[in-house]
Amino acid sequence: MARLGKVLASPYLQLSTAALLWSGNFIVGRALRGLISPLALNFWRWVIALAILLLFTHRLLWEHRRTIAREWKLIAALGFSGIAAFHTSVYAALVTTSALNALLLLVITPLLIAVGGWIAFRDPVTSRQVLGLGVSLAGAILLIARGSLSVLLTLEFTAGDLWMLLAVALWTVYSLLLKRRPAGLPQSALLCATTIAAVILMLPVYAWTGSGEELRSLRAPALWGLGYVAVFASVLAFLFWNNGVSKIGASRAGTFLYLMPFFGAVLSVIFLGEGVQMYQATGGVLIFIGIALMNWAREESMPT
C-alpha cells in the first residue's frame, strides 16, 4: 500500500494524468462550440469546480486565511492567467479553428516555459534538456500532422489561432507564477483561492454579456460535457498539474504537455476504433524519449 501511495504521489504520473484529462477538454470544447459561448462555458465550468473545491478545502482556506490575504496579488494573477483568461481564450479559439491547429500551437508552450524560467528565475537549461524538448516537439508535431508533411503545408490559420497564441502566452505565465507559491500553502487551498479569484474576475464580464440563458437551453450531452470539464479537466487536472510543477519545476513539467496529442491518438484508437498507425507509434516513442531526457535528473536536484 505504501508503494502504491508513492506511485500515485509521483509528479510524473500526476503531470501525465493532467495531460490526459486536458486532452479531453479540447474535444469537449470543440464539440460545444455553437451551443454555449466561450465565456459562459468557462464561467460555469469553474463555478461548478469551485463548489466542489469548497466542500473539501473550506477549512484549509480559513486556516491559511492570513497567507491568502497576504498573497492576494499572486492569487489574482494566477486566477486571471491560468483560469479566467486562459480557458476563455482556448474556447474562443476552438469556435473558429480546428483542434489540430490548437494543439499545434499548444506544443510551443514548453519551449516558452523553459525560456521564461531561464529569464525570470535563471533556471538552468542543459544541452540534454534542450535535446529533450526538441525530440518531444518533433514527436508531437508528427502526431498532430498524422505523419504527413502535406497536412502541415495545407493548414489554414484563422482568427481563432490568435486566441490560441494568447492562451499559450497566458499558460506560460501561469506555470511560471506557480514557482512563487508560498511554501506553507497547500495545493488544494491555493487552487480554491485561485478559482475564487477567477470567478470574481469573470462575473462582471459574464453578467455584462448576458449569457445566462445559454445554460438553460443545454441538453443532456452538453451538460455531461460541462460536467467533464468542471470535474476532471478543472479540479483534478489542476491539482495534479500544480502539484507536479511544485515538485519538479515549470520547465521540466512543461514537456508533459507534449503528451496531449499522444493521448488524443490513443483515445481515437480506444473510442473510435481507429487502427494504430506507424506515425502514432513513432511520435509516441519520440515524446517519451524527450520527456525522459528533459527530466533525467538526480532526485536531490529537484526543487522542493
Image (cartoon, rainbow, N blue to C red):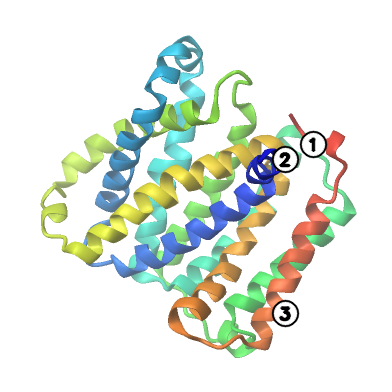
- Say left or right for 76 vs 219: right
Image mark for residue 248: 2
Separation of marks 2 and 1 at Cα, in angstroms: 5 Å
Query: Which numbered disc flags the more N-terminal residue, 2 or 1?
Result: 2
Please state the horizontal and vertical placement of residue 265, each as a whole percent of the image: 55, 75
Amino acid type, mark 1: Met
Q: Is residue 174 visible?
A: yes
- How crowded pointer 1 is (Cα within 10 Å; few <14, some 14-19, many 20+) is rated as few
Residue type marked 3: Thr
Above or below, comparing residue 86 to residue 180 in the picture: below
* Mark pair 2, 3: CA separation: 27 Å
Residue farthest to the top? Answer: 66
Q: Residue at x 62, y 50 (%)?
A: 15
Q: Quarter of the image for the C terminus: give it.
A: top right
Kind of residue at disc 2:
Ile
The quadrant the N terminus occupies is: top right
- The residue that disc 3 covers is 282
Which of disc 3 and disc 2 is earlier in sequence? 2
Mark 2, other Cα within 10 Å: few <14 / some 14–19 / many ≥20: some
Residue visible at 59% across and 85% down? 153
Question: What is the secondary structure assignment of the residue under circle 3?
Answer: helix
> In percent of the image, x 63 and y 21: which residue is there?
183
Q: Which residue is mark 1?
A: 302
Q: Where is 48 relative to 93, above or below?
A: above
Q: Are marks 2 and 1 in contact (CB under 8 Å)?
A: yes
Residue 41: horizontal and vertical position, in percent? 28, 52
Q: Which one is nearer the viewer's eye here, 260 or 83?
A: 260
